[in-house]
Image (cartoon, rainbow, N blue to C red):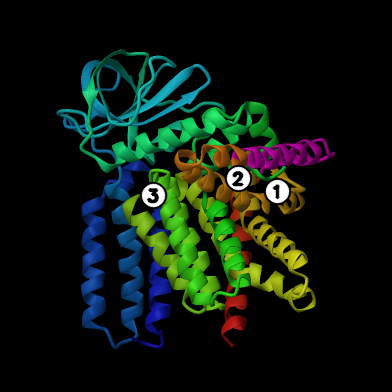
Amino acid sequence: MFKLSRSKTFQVCSLVFIFGIAISSFLPVSIRQFSLYFFAIFIFSLVASILFWRTKLAIFLLIISSLFFGFWRYSLSLPVLSPDYVYYYNERKIDLVGQVIEARTKGKIQKIKIDKIRGFKGKVLVITNLYPRYYYGDILRLECHLKPPQSFKNFDYPRFLAQDNIYSLCYYPEISFLGQNKNSIYFYLNKFKQKLSKIINYNLGEPESSLVNAIILGNKDNIPKFWREKFFCIGIGHILAISGMHIGILATILMFVFIELGLWRKTAFWLSSLFIFLYIILIGAPASAVRAGVMGFLVLLALSYGRLRNITNSLLLALLILLLINPKSLRDDVGLQLSFLAVLGIVYFYPFFNKILEDKIKHWRILDFFWKIFCISLAVQITIWPISLFYFSRISLISILSNLFVVGALPIIISLVLAAFLFYIVLPQMSSLLFLVVKFLLDYIMAVSDLFYKMPYACIGGSINLFFMFAYYLILFIIILKLKKASLS
Protein backbone atom coordinates (compact mmCIF):
# COMPACT_ATOMS: atom_id res chain seq x y z
CA MET A 1 0.00 0.00 0.00
CA PHE A 2 1.39 3.41 -0.96
CA LYS A 3 3.09 5.03 2.07
CA LEU A 4 0.37 3.91 4.50
CA SER A 5 0.54 0.87 6.74
CA ARG A 6 -2.43 -1.46 7.00
CA SER A 7 -3.27 0.02 10.40
CA LYS A 8 -3.23 3.59 9.08
CA THR A 9 -5.23 2.57 6.02
CA PHE A 10 -7.87 0.98 8.25
CA GLN A 11 -8.05 4.11 10.41
CA VAL A 12 -8.39 6.46 7.43
CA CYS A 13 -11.04 4.34 5.70
CA SER A 14 -12.96 3.88 8.94
CA LEU A 15 -13.03 7.61 9.65
CA VAL A 16 -14.14 8.34 6.07
CA PHE A 17 -16.91 5.71 6.34
CA ILE A 18 -18.11 7.29 9.61
CA PHE A 19 -17.92 10.73 7.98
CA GLY A 20 -20.01 9.42 5.07
CA ILE A 21 -22.73 8.24 7.45
CA ALA A 22 -22.60 11.57 9.29
CA ILE A 23 -22.96 13.56 6.05
CA SER A 24 -25.79 11.30 4.85
CA SER A 25 -27.78 11.91 8.01
CA PHE A 26 -27.97 15.62 7.14
CA LEU A 27 -28.63 15.29 3.40
CA PRO A 28 -32.13 15.88 1.98
CA VAL A 29 -34.25 12.74 1.67
CA SER A 30 -34.35 13.16 -2.12
CA ILE A 31 -30.55 12.68 -2.27
CA ARG A 32 -30.28 9.95 0.38
CA GLN A 33 -32.56 7.69 -1.64
CA PHE A 34 -30.00 7.20 -4.44
CA SER A 35 -28.84 3.96 -2.86
CA LEU A 36 -28.21 2.21 -6.19
CA TYR A 37 -25.88 4.99 -7.36
CA PHE A 38 -24.04 5.03 -4.02
CA PHE A 39 -23.57 1.25 -4.23
CA ALA A 40 -22.30 1.46 -7.83
CA ILE A 41 -19.69 4.11 -6.96
CA PHE A 42 -18.68 2.16 -3.84
CA ILE A 43 -18.10 -1.08 -5.82
CA PHE A 44 -16.44 0.67 -8.77
CA SER A 45 -13.99 2.54 -6.49
CA LEU A 46 -13.25 -0.59 -4.46
CA VAL A 47 -12.49 -2.69 -7.55
CA ALA A 48 -10.40 0.12 -9.05
CA SER A 49 -8.37 0.45 -5.82
CA ILE A 50 -7.52 -3.27 -6.06
CA LEU A 51 -6.48 -2.94 -9.70
CA PHE A 52 -4.24 0.06 -8.90
CA TRP A 53 -3.15 -1.32 -5.51
CA ARG A 54 0.52 -0.30 -5.67
CA THR A 55 0.00 3.15 -7.14
CA LYS A 56 -0.63 6.59 -5.67
CA LEU A 57 -4.21 6.37 -6.89
CA ALA A 58 -5.13 3.42 -4.66
CA ILE A 59 -5.53 5.30 -1.37
CA PHE A 60 -7.65 7.96 -3.08
CA LEU A 61 -9.93 5.27 -4.56
CA LEU A 62 -10.21 3.55 -1.17
CA ILE A 63 -11.26 6.83 0.42
CA ILE A 64 -13.92 7.37 -2.25
CA SER A 65 -15.10 3.78 -1.78
CA SER A 66 -15.32 4.19 2.02
CA LEU A 67 -17.22 7.48 1.68
CA PHE A 68 -19.85 6.05 -0.65
CA PHE A 69 -20.06 2.87 1.41
CA GLY A 70 -21.15 5.15 4.25
CA PHE A 71 -23.68 6.88 1.97
CA TRP A 72 -25.02 3.52 0.76
CA ARG A 73 -25.30 1.95 4.21
CA TYR A 74 -27.23 4.94 5.55
CA SER A 75 -29.57 4.97 2.55
CA LEU A 76 -30.42 1.30 3.22
CA SER A 77 -31.62 2.20 6.71
CA LEU A 78 -34.26 4.62 5.43
CA PRO A 79 -37.92 3.54 5.50
CA VAL A 80 -39.44 2.13 2.32
CA LEU A 81 -43.00 3.29 1.66
CA SER A 82 -44.59 -0.01 0.69
CA PRO A 83 -47.79 -1.88 1.67
CA ASP A 84 -45.54 -4.51 3.26
CA TYR A 85 -44.57 -2.03 6.00
CA VAL A 86 -46.88 -1.12 8.83
CA TYR A 87 -46.07 2.62 8.67
CA TYR A 88 -47.57 2.66 5.15
CA TYR A 89 -50.94 2.71 6.97
CA ASN A 90 -50.29 5.80 9.11
CA GLU A 91 -53.43 7.94 9.57
CA ARG A 92 -55.59 4.85 9.05
CA LYS A 93 -57.38 2.38 11.30
CA ILE A 94 -55.93 -1.12 11.22
CA ASP A 95 -56.02 -4.37 13.20
CA LEU A 96 -52.63 -5.73 14.16
CA VAL A 97 -51.35 -8.86 15.88
CA GLY A 98 -47.80 -8.61 17.20
CA GLN A 99 -45.39 -9.40 20.02
CA VAL A 100 -44.27 -7.16 22.86
CA ILE A 101 -40.50 -6.70 22.72
CA GLU A 102 -40.32 -3.99 25.37
CA ALA A 103 -42.77 -2.54 27.89
CA ARG A 104 -41.91 0.46 30.05
CA THR A 105 -43.94 2.57 32.43
CA LYS A 106 -43.85 6.35 32.68
CA GLY A 107 -46.13 7.96 35.20
CA LYS A 108 -49.63 6.66 34.52
CA ILE A 109 -48.98 5.18 31.07
CA GLN A 110 -47.25 2.23 29.45
CA LYS A 111 -45.07 2.50 26.37
CA ILE A 112 -45.04 -0.82 24.53
CA LYS A 113 -42.92 -1.68 21.49
CA ILE A 114 -44.65 -4.15 19.18
CA ASP A 115 -42.65 -6.20 16.67
CA LYS A 116 -43.13 -9.38 14.62
CA ILE A 117 -46.44 -8.02 13.36
CA ARG A 118 -48.29 -10.63 11.34
CA GLY A 119 -48.34 -9.74 7.65
CA PHE A 120 -46.23 -6.58 8.05
CA LYS A 121 -42.68 -5.41 8.53
CA GLY A 122 -41.73 -2.69 11.00
CA LYS A 123 -42.55 -1.82 14.59
CA VAL A 124 -45.25 0.16 16.38
CA LEU A 125 -44.97 2.10 19.64
CA VAL A 126 -48.17 1.72 21.67
CA ILE A 127 -49.15 4.21 24.38
CA THR A 128 -51.78 2.82 26.72
CA ASN A 129 -53.00 2.80 30.32
CA LEU A 130 -50.79 1.62 33.15
CA TYR A 131 -52.96 -1.46 33.74
CA PRO A 132 -53.20 -4.21 32.76
CA ARG A 133 -49.41 -4.59 32.58
CA TYR A 134 -47.81 -6.21 29.56
CA TYR A 135 -44.43 -7.92 29.33
CA TYR A 136 -41.88 -9.19 26.84
CA GLY A 137 -43.26 -12.07 24.80
CA ASP A 138 -46.95 -11.17 25.15
CA ILE A 139 -48.91 -11.63 21.92
CA LEU A 140 -51.47 -8.83 21.51
CA ARG A 141 -54.24 -7.95 19.08
CA LEU A 142 -54.54 -4.19 18.60
CA GLU A 143 -57.22 -2.05 17.03
CA CYS A 144 -55.10 0.96 16.12
CA HIS A 145 -55.46 4.31 14.48
CA LEU A 146 -51.81 4.68 13.44
CA LYS A 147 -50.19 8.09 13.74
CA PRO A 148 -46.76 9.29 12.60
CA PRO A 149 -44.62 10.68 15.45
CA GLN A 150 -44.41 14.49 15.76
CA SER A 151 -41.66 16.73 17.09
CA PHE A 152 -42.32 18.72 20.27
CA LYS A 153 -40.51 21.22 22.51
CA ASN A 154 -37.45 21.39 20.21
CA PHE A 155 -37.15 17.59 20.42
CA ASP A 156 -37.02 15.66 17.14
CA TYR A 157 -39.16 12.76 18.29
CA PRO A 158 -39.46 11.18 14.80
CA ARG A 159 -35.66 10.88 14.50
CA PHE A 160 -35.42 9.56 18.06
CA LEU A 161 -37.86 6.74 17.24
CA ALA A 162 -36.45 6.16 13.76
CA GLN A 163 -33.16 4.90 15.19
CA ASP A 164 -35.19 1.92 16.46
CA ASN A 165 -37.06 1.68 13.13
CA ILE A 166 -40.30 2.95 14.66
CA TYR A 167 -42.36 5.20 12.39
CA SER A 168 -45.87 4.60 13.76
CA LEU A 169 -47.61 5.38 17.06
CA CYS A 170 -50.78 3.83 18.40
CA TYR A 171 -52.58 5.74 21.19
CA TYR A 172 -54.86 3.88 23.63
CA PRO A 173 -55.99 1.08 21.31
CA GLU A 174 -58.37 -1.76 22.08
CA ILE A 175 -56.03 -4.54 23.24
CA SER A 176 -56.73 -8.27 23.42
CA PHE A 177 -54.23 -10.62 25.07
CA LEU A 178 -53.70 -13.73 22.90
CA GLY A 179 -50.94 -15.55 24.78
CA GLN A 180 -47.17 -15.59 25.16
CA ASN A 181 -44.28 -16.49 22.88
CA LYS A 182 -42.00 -18.64 25.03
CA ASN A 183 -39.76 -19.77 22.17
CA SER A 184 -37.03 -17.26 22.93
CA ILE A 185 -34.20 -17.12 25.41
CA TYR A 186 -35.00 -13.43 25.91
CA PHE A 187 -38.42 -14.40 27.25
CA TYR A 188 -36.81 -16.39 30.06
CA LEU A 189 -34.12 -13.78 30.62
CA ASN A 190 -36.84 -11.18 31.01
CA LYS A 191 -38.71 -13.41 33.48
CA PHE A 192 -35.49 -13.83 35.43
CA LYS A 193 -34.96 -10.07 35.38
CA GLN A 194 -38.50 -9.55 36.74
CA LYS A 195 -37.75 -12.03 39.53
CA LEU A 196 -34.60 -10.10 40.48
CA SER A 197 -36.58 -6.87 40.46
CA LYS A 198 -39.12 -8.38 42.86
CA ILE A 199 -36.29 -9.39 45.21
CA ILE A 200 -35.00 -5.81 45.18
CA ASN A 201 -38.46 -4.37 45.81
CA TYR A 202 -39.08 -6.83 48.66
CA ASN A 203 -35.87 -5.91 50.48
CA LEU A 204 -35.72 -2.16 49.80
CA GLY A 205 -38.27 0.61 50.07
CA GLU A 206 -38.56 3.66 47.84
CA PRO A 207 -36.65 5.43 46.47
CA GLU A 208 -33.79 2.97 47.14
CA SER A 209 -35.47 0.10 45.26
CA SER A 210 -35.99 2.26 42.15
CA LEU A 211 -32.36 3.37 42.24
CA VAL A 212 -31.08 -0.21 42.55
CA ASN A 213 -33.39 -1.36 39.73
CA ALA A 214 -31.80 1.32 37.54
CA ILE A 215 -28.21 0.72 38.61
CA ILE A 216 -28.34 -3.09 38.46
CA LEU A 217 -31.07 -3.96 35.94
CA GLY A 218 -31.24 -0.83 33.79
CA ASN A 219 -34.89 -0.17 34.66
CA LYS A 220 -35.31 3.59 35.25
CA ASP A 221 -39.10 3.70 34.95
CA ASN A 222 -39.95 4.23 38.62
CA ILE A 223 -37.24 6.65 39.71
CA PRO A 224 -38.88 9.75 41.25
CA LYS A 225 -38.55 12.76 38.97
CA PHE A 226 -36.88 14.97 41.57
CA TRP A 227 -34.13 12.38 42.22
CA ARG A 228 -33.54 11.96 38.51
CA GLU A 229 -33.25 15.75 38.25
CA LYS A 230 -30.77 15.97 41.13
CA PHE A 231 -28.55 13.19 39.80
CA PHE A 232 -28.36 14.64 36.31
CA CYS A 233 -27.89 18.19 37.54
CA ILE A 234 -24.78 17.35 39.57
CA GLY A 235 -23.34 15.08 36.89
CA ILE A 236 -23.91 11.61 38.37
CA GLY A 237 -26.87 10.66 36.19
CA HIS A 238 -24.69 8.03 34.50
CA ILE A 239 -25.02 5.77 37.55
CA LEU A 240 -28.73 5.40 36.70
CA ALA A 241 -28.01 4.01 33.24
CA ILE A 242 -26.03 1.01 32.09
CA SER A 243 -24.02 3.15 29.70
CA GLY A 244 -20.52 3.14 28.30
CA MET A 245 -19.51 5.59 30.99
CA HIS A 246 -21.04 3.36 33.67
CA ILE A 247 -19.34 0.14 32.53
CA GLY A 248 -16.14 1.97 31.55
CA ILE A 249 -15.71 3.31 35.07
CA LEU A 250 -16.68 -0.06 36.55
CA ALA A 251 -14.22 -1.86 34.26
CA THR A 252 -11.39 0.47 35.27
CA ILE A 253 -12.11 -0.01 38.96
CA LEU A 254 -12.32 -3.80 38.51
CA MET A 255 -8.91 -3.83 36.85
CA PHE A 256 -7.50 -1.72 39.67
CA VAL A 257 -8.94 -3.99 42.37
CA PHE A 258 -7.75 -7.23 40.75
CA ILE A 259 -4.26 -5.86 40.17
CA GLU A 260 -4.10 -4.61 43.75
CA LEU A 261 -5.04 -8.14 44.88
CA GLY A 262 -1.82 -9.32 43.25
CA LEU A 263 -3.14 -10.73 39.96
CA TRP A 264 -1.22 -10.40 36.72
CA ARG A 265 -2.51 -7.70 34.41
CA LYS A 266 -3.66 -10.24 31.78
CA THR A 267 -5.45 -12.31 34.43
CA ALA A 268 -7.15 -9.20 35.78
CA PHE A 269 -8.20 -8.31 32.24
CA TRP A 270 -9.90 -11.66 31.58
CA LEU A 271 -11.56 -11.78 35.01
CA SER A 272 -12.92 -8.24 34.57
CA SER A 273 -14.13 -9.05 31.04
CA LEU A 274 -15.86 -12.19 32.32
CA PHE A 275 -17.52 -10.18 35.11
CA ILE A 276 -18.92 -7.65 32.61
CA PHE A 277 -20.06 -10.38 30.20
CA LEU A 278 -21.94 -12.27 32.92
CA TYR A 279 -23.41 -9.03 34.21
CA ILE A 280 -24.83 -8.12 30.78
CA ILE A 281 -26.33 -11.62 30.38
CA LEU A 282 -27.79 -11.37 33.88
CA ILE A 283 -29.79 -8.22 33.08
CA GLY A 284 -31.18 -9.67 29.84
CA ALA A 285 -28.64 -8.25 27.37
CA PRO A 286 -30.54 -5.10 26.26
CA ALA A 287 -29.02 -3.29 23.27
CA SER A 288 -27.77 -0.36 25.37
CA ALA A 289 -25.98 -2.72 27.76
CA VAL A 290 -24.42 -4.72 24.92
CA ARG A 291 -23.13 -1.49 23.40
CA ALA A 292 -21.83 -0.39 26.78
CA GLY A 293 -20.20 -3.78 27.25
CA VAL A 294 -18.33 -3.44 23.97
CA MET A 295 -17.04 -0.03 25.02
CA GLY A 296 -16.20 -1.28 28.53
CA PHE A 297 -14.27 -4.19 27.04
CA LEU A 298 -12.16 -1.71 25.09
CA VAL A 299 -11.27 0.13 28.28
CA LEU A 300 -10.16 -3.17 29.80
CA LEU A 301 -8.17 -3.94 26.67
CA ALA A 302 -6.39 -0.60 26.92
CA LEU A 303 -5.59 -1.12 30.59
CA SER A 304 -4.48 -4.73 30.06
CA TYR A 305 -1.85 -3.68 27.52
CA GLY A 306 -0.87 -0.68 29.61
CA ARG A 307 -0.39 1.48 26.51
CA LEU A 308 -2.37 2.73 23.55
CA ARG A 309 -0.95 0.54 20.78
CA ASN A 310 -3.80 -0.80 18.57
CA ILE A 311 -6.47 0.64 20.87
CA THR A 312 -7.46 3.18 18.23
CA ASN A 313 -8.19 0.39 15.76
CA SER A 314 -10.16 -1.56 18.38
CA LEU A 315 -12.27 1.49 19.20
CA LEU A 316 -12.91 2.21 15.53
CA LEU A 317 -13.77 -1.43 14.87
CA ALA A 318 -16.35 -1.43 17.67
CA LEU A 319 -17.93 1.76 16.32
CA LEU A 320 -17.93 0.37 12.77
CA ILE A 321 -19.78 -2.76 13.88
CA LEU A 322 -22.38 -0.71 15.75
CA LEU A 323 -22.88 1.62 12.76
CA LEU A 324 -23.10 -1.23 10.26
CA ILE A 325 -25.91 -2.65 12.40
CA ASN A 326 -27.66 0.71 12.84
CA PRO A 327 -26.19 3.69 10.96
CA LYS A 328 -28.92 6.05 12.22
CA SER A 329 -27.48 5.77 15.72
CA LEU A 330 -24.48 7.97 14.84
CA ARG A 331 -26.60 11.12 14.73
CA ASP A 332 -29.66 10.15 16.75
CA ASP A 333 -28.45 7.85 19.55
CA VAL A 334 -27.15 10.14 22.30
CA GLY A 335 -26.24 7.07 24.34
CA LEU A 336 -23.88 5.82 21.63
CA GLN A 337 -22.27 9.24 21.32
CA LEU A 338 -21.75 9.55 25.06
CA SER A 339 -20.49 5.97 25.35
CA PHE A 340 -17.95 6.37 22.55
CA LEU A 341 -16.69 9.75 23.75
CA ALA A 342 -16.49 8.58 27.37
CA VAL A 343 -14.35 5.59 26.40
CA LEU A 344 -12.25 7.82 24.15
CA GLY A 345 -11.60 10.11 27.10
CA ILE A 346 -10.72 7.24 29.45
CA VAL A 347 -8.38 5.60 26.93
CA TYR A 348 -6.45 8.72 25.93
CA PHE A 349 -6.74 11.31 28.70
CA TYR A 350 -6.94 9.16 31.84
CA PRO A 351 -3.34 7.83 31.53
CA PHE A 352 -2.08 11.39 30.95
CA PHE A 353 -3.80 12.78 34.07
CA ASN A 354 -3.00 9.74 36.18
CA LYS A 355 0.75 10.12 35.59
CA ILE A 356 0.75 13.55 37.24
CA LEU A 357 0.61 12.12 40.78
CA GLU A 358 0.87 8.37 40.19
CA ASP A 359 4.47 7.99 41.36
CA LYS A 360 3.97 10.25 44.39
CA ILE A 361 0.87 8.56 45.85
CA LYS A 362 1.07 4.96 44.59
CA HIS A 363 2.04 3.75 48.07
CA TRP A 364 -1.07 5.37 49.58
CA ARG A 365 -3.69 2.89 48.42
CA ILE A 366 -6.84 4.81 49.34
CA LEU A 367 -5.47 8.12 48.04
CA ASP A 368 -4.36 6.44 44.83
CA PHE A 369 -7.81 4.88 44.41
CA PHE A 370 -9.63 8.21 44.68
CA TRP A 371 -7.05 9.90 42.47
CA LYS A 372 -7.82 7.38 39.73
CA ILE A 373 -11.55 8.04 40.08
CA PHE A 374 -10.87 11.78 39.83
CA CYS A 375 -8.75 11.27 36.69
CA ILE A 376 -11.41 9.06 35.08
CA SER A 377 -14.14 11.61 35.78
CA LEU A 378 -11.99 14.46 34.47
CA ALA A 379 -11.13 12.52 31.30
CA VAL A 380 -14.79 11.71 30.68
CA GLN A 381 -16.01 15.25 31.28
CA ILE A 382 -13.46 16.69 28.83
CA THR A 383 -14.91 14.59 26.04
CA ILE A 384 -18.66 14.68 26.76
CA TRP A 385 -19.49 18.20 27.99
CA PRO A 386 -20.20 19.69 24.50
CA ILE A 387 -22.56 16.80 23.67
CA SER A 388 -24.31 17.19 27.03
CA LEU A 389 -24.71 20.93 26.50
CA PHE A 390 -25.93 20.47 22.92
CA TYR A 391 -28.62 17.89 23.73
CA PHE A 392 -29.63 18.77 27.29
CA SER A 393 -28.88 22.52 27.33
CA ARG A 394 -27.03 22.33 30.63
CA ILE A 395 -23.82 21.10 32.18
CA SER A 396 -22.69 20.42 35.72
CA LEU A 397 -19.85 22.53 37.10
CA ILE A 398 -19.22 20.17 40.00
CA SER A 399 -19.54 16.79 38.27
CA ILE A 400 -15.89 15.90 38.80
CA LEU A 401 -16.22 16.55 42.53
CA SER A 402 -19.58 14.79 42.89
CA ASN A 403 -18.28 11.74 41.02
CA LEU A 404 -15.33 11.62 43.38
CA PHE A 405 -17.73 11.10 46.30
CA VAL A 406 -20.16 8.78 44.52
CA VAL A 407 -18.43 6.55 41.96
CA GLY A 408 -16.42 4.65 44.59
CA ALA A 409 -19.66 3.33 46.07
CA LEU A 410 -20.95 2.04 42.74
CA PRO A 411 -18.92 -1.21 42.42
CA ILE A 412 -19.58 -1.93 46.10
CA ILE A 413 -23.34 -1.59 45.57
CA ILE A 414 -23.26 -3.81 42.47
CA SER A 415 -21.13 -6.46 44.23
CA LEU A 416 -23.36 -6.48 47.31
CA VAL A 417 -26.58 -6.74 45.32
CA LEU A 418 -25.22 -9.60 43.19
CA ALA A 419 -24.10 -11.39 46.36
CA ALA A 420 -27.53 -10.75 47.91
CA PHE A 421 -29.17 -12.42 44.89
CA LEU A 422 -26.99 -15.51 45.44
CA PHE A 423 -27.78 -15.67 49.16
CA TYR A 424 -31.52 -15.05 48.67
CA ILE A 425 -32.40 -18.75 48.32
CA VAL A 426 -29.79 -20.48 50.49
CA LEU A 427 -29.39 -17.90 53.26
CA PRO A 428 -32.11 -15.21 53.17
CA GLN A 429 -30.92 -13.61 56.42
CA MET A 430 -27.53 -12.84 54.85
CA SER A 431 -29.33 -11.47 51.76
CA SER A 432 -31.35 -9.10 53.96
CA LEU A 433 -28.19 -7.98 55.75
CA LEU A 434 -26.46 -7.21 52.46
CA PHE A 435 -29.45 -5.22 51.25
CA LEU A 436 -29.30 -3.29 54.51
CA VAL A 437 -25.72 -2.27 53.69
CA VAL A 438 -26.85 -1.36 50.16
CA LYS A 439 -29.56 0.86 51.66
CA PHE A 440 -26.94 2.63 53.77
CA LEU A 441 -24.76 3.28 50.70
CA LEU A 442 -27.73 4.55 48.68
CA ASP A 443 -28.75 6.85 51.52
CA TYR A 444 -25.19 8.14 51.51
CA ILE A 445 -25.37 8.80 47.74
CA MET A 446 -28.69 10.61 48.12
CA ALA A 447 -27.33 12.71 51.01
CA VAL A 448 -24.29 13.65 48.91
CA SER A 449 -26.59 14.47 45.98
CA ASP A 450 -28.71 16.73 48.19
CA LEU A 451 -25.60 18.51 49.42
CA PHE A 452 -24.14 19.16 45.98
CA TYR A 453 -27.52 19.99 44.43
CA LYS A 454 -27.94 22.86 46.91
CA MET A 455 -24.57 24.37 45.96
CA PRO A 456 -24.70 27.60 43.93
CA TYR A 457 -24.24 27.02 40.21
CA ALA A 458 -24.21 23.22 40.65
CA CYS A 459 -25.42 23.07 37.07
CA ILE A 460 -25.95 25.84 34.56
CA GLY A 461 -28.12 26.09 31.49
CA GLY A 462 -26.86 27.10 28.10
CA SER A 463 -26.63 26.11 24.48
CA ILE A 464 -23.99 25.31 21.92
CA ASN A 465 -24.18 25.29 18.14
CA LEU A 466 -22.92 22.62 15.77
CA PHE A 467 -20.03 24.77 14.50
CA PHE A 468 -18.56 25.32 17.97
CA MET A 469 -19.01 21.64 18.85
CA PHE A 470 -17.33 20.57 15.62
CA ALA A 471 -14.42 22.95 16.26
CA TYR A 472 -14.02 21.67 19.84
CA TYR A 473 -13.89 18.02 18.76
CA LEU A 474 -11.52 18.85 15.92
CA ILE A 475 -9.10 20.36 18.46
CA LEU A 476 -9.66 17.36 20.74
CA PHE A 477 -8.90 15.04 17.83
CA ILE A 478 -5.59 16.81 17.18
CA ILE A 479 -4.67 16.54 20.89
CA ILE A 480 -5.49 12.82 20.85
CA LEU A 481 -3.24 12.31 17.83
CA LYS A 482 -0.39 14.03 19.68
CA LEU A 483 -0.98 11.96 22.84
CA LYS A 484 -1.07 8.79 20.77
CA LYS A 485 2.14 9.73 19.00
CA ALA A 486 3.83 10.49 22.32
CA SER A 487 2.70 7.17 23.85
CA LEU A 488 4.09 5.17 20.92
CA SER A 489 7.41 7.00 20.74
**Where in the figure is residue 182, as x and y percent of width and height?**
23, 34
Q: Tell which circle, 1 or 3, labels the residue nearer the N-terminal end.
A: 3
Residue 412 seen anywhere in this rendered image of the structure: yes
**Where in the figure is residue 468, as x and y percent of width and height?**
64, 53
Query: Which residue is labeled 2 in the image?
Result: 239
Q: Residue furthest right?
A: 456
Which label belongs to residue 281?
3
- Please say if the residues under marks 2 and 3 sit with CB atoms less than 8 Å apart: no
Q: Describe the element under mark 2 as helix, strand or loop.
A: helix
> Which three-letter amino acid code belongs to the residue tagged 2?
Ile
- Please say if the residues under marks 1 and 3 sit with CB atoms less than 8 Å apart: no
Query: Which residue is labeled 1 in the image?
Result: 406
C-alpha separation, residue under disc 1 versus residue under disc 2: 9 Å
Q: Is residue 311 magenta?
A: no
> Which three-letter amino acid code belongs to the residue tagged 3?
Ile
Q: Tell which circle, 1 or 2, labels the residue nearer the N-terminal end.
A: 2
Report the quarter where the N terminus lies: bottom left
Q: Which portion, as a residue range, is magenta?
A: 435-463
- Please say if the residues under marks 1 and 2 sit with CB atoms less than 8 Å apart: yes
Q: On the picture, is 141 further left or further right than 329?
A: left
Q: Describe the element under mark 1 as helix, strand or loop.
A: helix
Q: Circle 2: is it few (<14), some (14-19), or many (20+) Cα within 10 Å?
A: many
Q: On the picture, is 264 further left or further right than 1?
A: right
